Image (tube, rainbow, N blue to C red):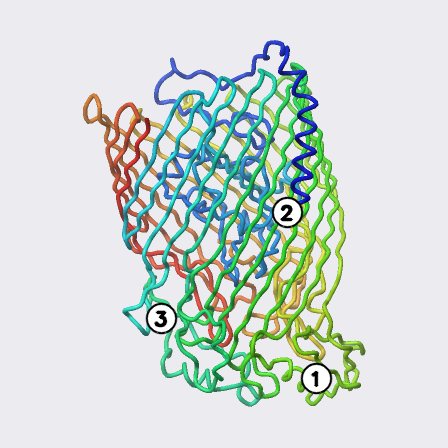
Amino acid sequence: MKRALAVFRASSAAWVFVTPAFAQSAPPAPVVQQAPDTADLDERQIGDIIVTAQKRSERINDVPLSITAATGETLAKAGVVAPEDLVKVVPGFSYARTLFGAPSFIIRGVGVTDSSLSLTPAVSAYVDQVPLPYLVEASGAAFDLERVEVLKGPQGTLFGQNSTGGAVNFVAAKPTNDFQAGGSFTYGRFNQADIEAFISGPISSTLNGRLAMRHESRDGWQVSQTRPGERLGVRDFTQARALLDWKPSDRLNFELNLNGWRDRSETQAFQFQSLSPQLPAAAGGATEYVNAISPIYTQPAPRNPRLADWGVELAPGLPAFYQQGAPGSDLHKKNSFVQISLKGEAQLSDAVTLTSISAYSHYKQSAPFDLDATRFWQGNFRISGDIENVFQELRLAGDIKQLKWMVGGNYSHDSVDENQLYQLAGSNSSIAGFRFANAQSDFLHRVKTVSAFGDVQYEILPDLTAQGSVRYTNYKDNFRGCLRDAVGSQWSAALQNFANNILGASPPVSFAPGGCLSLHLESAPGVAPPSFSAPQPVVRSLQEDNISWRAGLSWKISANNMLYANVTRGYKSGGFPGVVALVDSQFDPIGQESVLAYEAGFKLSLAERVINLNGAGFYYDYIGKQLISYVPNPALGPSLALVAIPKSRIQGFELETTIRPTQELTISAAATYIDSRVVSSFNAFTPLGAPKNIRGEQLPNTPKWQLQGGVDYVAPMSSAIDLHLGGSARYQSSTNATFGEESSFLIRGYTIVDAFAGIESSNGKWTAQVWGRNLFNKYYLTSILQGGDTIGRTTGMGATYGITVNFKY
């Protein structure tokens, strides 16, 4: 918090210095080129979307990048209320749930899957250009939006590292110059009741404000496979945002954004797929749990999206203390987020603008997870954490005839404190015949990032523009990790017995009660007996730097048509794994990954702007793809660690079109093809523990085909009321949830169909709409994971339907 106050004080002091000069005698504001006025054009013509993909306002068809932009109205019709819902409207975008619930965004096959809160993404998220450096913070980002912009391909030069796959910029609806108010109410299946409201307008002649709030509630939608009367999946999510825009002069503007959310929803339970003991009984593994579930869960759960199971009782043979702290049937989260940001813009001259962005955010979490998909307390976890972010950016931008330029720098400091509580029983937790594990891991990260960047666009010939941008980034992560006993556990005694009596450690090791348990292997691999040093916290540091860059050419064939080509290099930072580290080498950091991307595309507005057609072809060299995997351990066998695949490649294409054949009808369609492959030799372990060289395998969670289409029809019923009908469908082909090409981890292809029908006032003041999502109750999977001795899967929601009423004053 002290760092946050220091940043805001410094920012405020700088603005106090420049404010009087502009507030006292500001010259007339320069004329800013706006999107063409289409009021007198054929009403069939498709309007422009203004985006800030290059940190300046531009028409989307003037930006030489692959971008999908959707307005707030489009997002609402599609039912986009959370970032993962972007799969409904963004071609090439995928979402995966990680082991402990942290989200993973994937664009064109570039993404990372880890189990820790400190997961740094490969697809970064922003709200009004303010970064959300860890995706767990983005849960409330899709709220009261003007639009969302999804930039595809490396975006490291303007948006920084950790955007090798792309960037998602959520643009909040802004305060208005005139008074406006509105809201919506939704009631749907499972007693869903969502309410949203906003008020916006002038507070004084120089100050405008906007206040928006939303609450989502829903009863449990999951049904226990063994206890049909029990439900899970309650939704209880509340968020709010307050915006103030202060414009003391024509050349000076400030935007203050205070937002936050609270989540008391229940975590989703897994559906049982198969029994997969980690260790056979002959290896000394505990069999009580396996024997208990074998007669109950003999087959995969039926293909019913609502069925699942979660723990409510102890498995036979487990001691009573194992119940201490177990989530049991209470799977409610206690997560919250708050952020404050200040953006200031000063027009230093008719051609030069100074921009400052200061931000502080704080995320807290306590979330239980039941991963084993059975009614027993076998694989229970509680992930608690505290994340603080401080961010400051300062940049200058200019526009002089044929030249547009930008220079700037930013600083960020992230503090991540995480505790992972594990409660495991079964063969995989057996250590020298010990039948259960009750332990916790503590991770502390102190991350500092400093960068400087520049961007130049120069019109070298009429309508032919060259662009170049570059960013230097210096990154440092100070890490402390420790595996220790949880309350009432005797795991330290079992580990000590294992090291001394089974492995024959020389000299013998001992564990201090409550101390760290990760062993340090001092002797060379294969040397007998192994030599261990006394366990202690693992303290390490990782420091890296890199230079991201982009070079491109764009040719404006006409005012609304463009061809472009880019070559881009981007980086994702390295880091430390958040794993159960029985030996300290499992905490070894991994270096940064990089993507070298080649892309060529077009943006066309045809038939006098009745048809929009955008497309791009791309090829990526993907170096050092990061993932959590099992690695050989000389003392313990396969152990979890963070590893890097030396080289992969991705190639494909995208096509998007919007057609408006009549004033009343709009048709949209999109297709994405992605061919991804590991091209280097890499020896890994499958999720079932078998060693395998994964060369030639497809990247996980990367379907080859994603297809989308939709229709929107508006026709007058009377002079005051319009009929509004619409629908959409999306398809994705099969993909694997992880490497290894195990059939148990195949996510089959599926098609989802949504539709709506309603009436609305011709002046746009109110709408009433009935809607249905996943109309045909399609059964589909979003992830498949191994939780102890079982393989479980998470399902997408089945059919939902309801009514939504909107009004605006």
Residue tagged 2: 162
Quarter in which the C terminus is drawn: top left
Amino acid type at image mark 1: Ala
Within the image, what quadrant is residue 470 found in?
top right
Position of 287 relative to 590 (above/below): below
Cα separation between marks 2 and 3: 38 Å
Q: First in sequence: mark 2 or mark 1? A: 2
User: Which of the two residues, 136 or 472, is positioned nearer the viewer here?
Assistant: 136
Residue depicted at x 48% and y 37%: 148
| Farthest left residue in view | 718
Position of 624 relative to 688 (above/below): above
Cα separation between marks 2 and 1: 39 Å
Q: Is residue 447 left or right of residue 558?
A: right
Q: Secondary structure at mark 1?
A: helix
Q: Is residue 374 left or right of residue 571?
A: left
Mark closer to the observer (1, 3): 1
Residue depicted at x 52% and y 63%: 99
Residue 361 placed where, x, y %? 58, 44
Does residue 402 appear in this view? no
Amino acid type at image mark 3: Ala
Q: Secondary structure at mark 3?
A: loop
Residue tagged 1: 499
User: Which of the two residues, 786 or 460, is positioned nearer the viewer here?
Assistant: 786
**Circle 2/circle 3 CB separation < 8 Å:** no
